[in-house]
Image: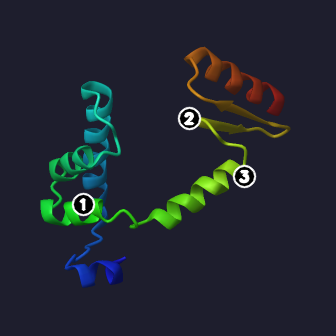
Amino acid sequence: MAAYGTPLGIDFRFDVEKGKEVANKIINSLYSQYFEQAQHPSSSSTLLTAATAAGVDEAQATAFIDDESEGLQGVKMLIREQAGNGIDAVPYTRIEGKRRDLTLEGAKKIPEYVKALEQVTKDSG
């Protein structure tokens, strides 16, 4: 990653603790903007707001956000992989049991998750 950033003037630092803190701040900002402010989670302005709220330098964040090819190939590969696994809805929850696995696709109510967990527990008994 550092090799990609250096030519662009980005000095990536992989301080694990800071990385988690920044990532959590970005995620919390994206959730807040999407669920509370009706902002699109992939719009440039939403992403920039989240990054700067997390303490990322605005110029570095803007350069990363504006580079539409950054990470694109990896994301497309992951999408193809999941589509090949039959996944076309989120959340996609797979509960692995001893005898069989249960899969819940799309938004479910809590009782449906409880029922699935109880079934896997019963089958695995």
Marks 1 and 3 sit apart, C-alpha to C-alpha, by 35 Å
Secondary-structure class at tag 1 = helix
Can you tell which of label 1 and label 3 is closer to the viewer?
3
Classify residue 12 as left or right of residue 87. left
* Amino acid type, mark 1: Lys
Q: In percent of the image, x 67 and y 38: which residue is there?
A: 94
Classify residue 114 as left or right of residue 6. right
Relative depth, front residue between 47 and 91: 47
Can you tell which of label 3 and label 2 is closer to the viewer?
3
Classify residue 116 as left or right of residue 35. right
Above or below for 111 versus 64 = above
Q: In percent of the image, x 65 and y 50: which residue is there?
A: 82
Q: Residue tagged by mark 2?
A: 91
Q: Earlier in the sequence, mark 3 or mark 2?
A: 3
Q: Position of residue 7 (x, y in %)?
A: 26, 84
* Amino acid type, mark 2: Pro
Q: Earlier in the sequence, mark 2 or mark 1?
A: 1
Relative depth, front residue between 94 and 62: 62
Q: Position of residue 72 (x, y in %)?
A: 46, 63
Secondary-structure class at tag 3 = helix
Tell me the quarter of the picture where residue 4 sits.
bottom left
Q: Position of residue 51 (x, y in %)?
A: 22, 52
Above or below for 30 versus 73 = above
Q: In percent of the image, x 30 and y 71: which residue is there?
A: 14
* Amino acid type, mark 3: Gly
Tell me the quadrant of the picture where the C terminus can be found.
top right
Tag on residue 84? 3
Tag on residue 18? 1
Secondary-structure class at tag 2 = loop
Marks 2 and 1 sit apart, C-alpha to C-alpha, by 28 Å
